[in-house]
Image: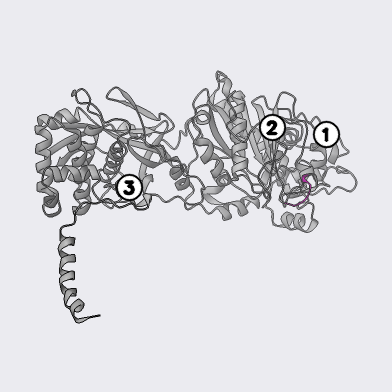
Amino acid sequence: MSPRHRRRLPLLGALCLALAACAGPVSAVRVDPKVVLRDLGRSAITTGEPSWPTRNVLFEYELFEAFGQRPEDAIAELHRAMVASGGDQDLLFALAELSFLHGQAAGKPDYYLASAVYAYAFLFPEDTGVAAPGRFDPRLRSAADLYNRALIVCFTSGDGSEVVPRGGGFALPFGRMDVAFDPSALRAGDRELYQFIPTGELQVRGLAMRYRWPGLGAPLAASARPIDVSKPGRDMVAPRLRVPVTAVLRISDARRALVHGEPLVGRLELHLMWDEESVSIAGERVPLEGEPSAALAFTFTGLPIIEVETFGFLGRLSGIMAERPPLVSTTPYKPGLIPVVFVHGTQSSIPRWAEMFNRLLADPAIRGRYQFWFFQYDSGNPIALSALLLRDSLTNAIAKLDPEGKDPALRKMVLVGHSQGGLLVKMQVVDSGDQIWRAASKVPLDDLHLSDTTRDMVERGLFVKPSPYVSRVVFVCTPHRGSYVAGRNFIANAVRRLLTLPFALVGASAELAKNPNLAKAGLSPVVPSAVDNMSPRHSFIRALQKIPVAPNVTVNSIIGVDTDGPIETGNDGVVEYSSAHIEPVESELVVHWNHSLQGRPETIEEIRRILRLNIGLKTGGLGEAHEESQTPPR
């Protein structure tokens, strides 16, 4: 480079700097849309920053820097501007966000409550003559979230562990608000609600789907206990159930009171999800915020499932679990709802149905027409005994809930049984005559010397009639012709040695053994376990498979196949297709999965389809009757 050119370099650099200084300070650069959407979606709730509408308000009123340095002064200035404007909705929303952010940063509950008041006034202008925000305004959802979250903080206990519904006087940055609360709201039928946990703070594990019903109010999960333990009442609500509840703080004429400086008055309400899903506010139906999946998951938190299933199978549960009711419900009884009764299989339990129940509850058509019951039992006991317990539980429930027989829905039950549970279900819908007895004994029951108690147990357990309450059954991986796993002698022998039979059955067994030549040749006089019963060679399963389901009961079947090759020769690891397949059925769905397929989407959607079809609705599932799913093998 020549000396002359070298001397010009500083001049060229200075010229470039001058030109850069003259460049426009405003520009728009095309970037990844996700970056822009993330920036546009900022809010006090999602990112902990003011949204763009709130930032705009701060700049318009020259308070952006002031909020960062003197937040309370900035909020007070915006409050005065809101009053002067007659309740401008832009200012109300900005005040809701900024009060929430300051309450969070400074740990001041009065600002949280102010956020709820401003958000409520923004959402419900009532009769102030100011139009409500348009339905496409993204601030609507943000305002509801601010209100819902603020309520939780305002009524949180001192240690922060739960929400405590209460009334009284509550401080605000610009005054106070009197909140009324009726303690009778803590009563749900014959139960008292307590220990309210905010479900929005719960991370759900073990469920593939999490359903949230967006709306207004703080979603909570409450524990429930009998008000009078000596009077359990008519409902069958599961003792461990966490009841989904939504807390709503109604604020009378919130916008008008803010503008005119009038005293603020509120009323805290508790709404049980099983009673209502919306409320009327300012002349409109407003959906209630709900977190049913979180409440369901919280119900099973801390339950030692493996221990319950293993010791339940062996008949060795003790203490509280031994006294668990065999039939429980997820809601109090409500006339007009058809019971869907889930019956688990061998060494299983109610939580195995959680994924399915979670999905079914999310379908408004289903939850509006059905109630869900769950049967639990010691699955190692003889199948006839467990089936008798199921029959007695259903009969007792009907007598308890509808003693006068006025509710026809209770006589349209749908029973869903998995594996051994399907055999218990079948025992509710067959006319066995003496076939099961004759398959095992060559002596007529009437010729035996038995006590009245033992004779009654045998008659009711083995000589059964179709239940008048059941209209449809769904078999899931049911070993109608036995399980090849149960047919392995070393397994059956091990179970028999470990199994602890109920005291009543031990006594009945001793009585039966005193009758000579009772059992047929080649059959053991020992009381069988459920595993014995499910051996393809056992007299019980060989007799039951020949007995058809009552013709007035609709049958659906779901079968697992987890092997390659033709379906007809496949199995699910426990049950052969040829054992699970029965005729006639309304539909049969084959799911390419193993024996534990209750939580599979194909299974769940098929149950949903069946339940919708049962009440005359479009299927909304995988289609009409199936012979094979479209899901490829694993």
Look at the magenta stretch and give its main secondary structure.
Answer: loop
Residue assigned mark 3? 162
Task: Give the spatial CA distance, label 3 vs label 2.
Answer: 48 Å
Residue assigned mark 2? 625
Residue 105 x %, y %: 21, 53
Foreground tag (2 vs 1)? 2
In the rendering, which numbered label is found on residue 179?
Answer: none
> Foreground: 279 or 382?
279
Quarter of the image for the N terminus: give it: bottom left
Taking 546 as reference, is 483 above or below it? below
Residue projecting furthest to the right = 521
Taking 47 as reference, is 422 above or below it? above
The mark that comes first in sequence, 3 or 2, is 3
Q: Looking at the image, which residue is at 15% across and 53% down?
A: 68
The mark that comes first in sequence, 2 or 1, is 1
Q: Give the residue type at disc 3.
A: Glu
Helix, strand or loop at disc 2? loop
- The magenta stretch spans residue 160: no
- The magenta stretch spans residue 565: yes
In the rendering, which numbered label is found on residue 435?
Answer: 1
Magenta stretch? 563-567
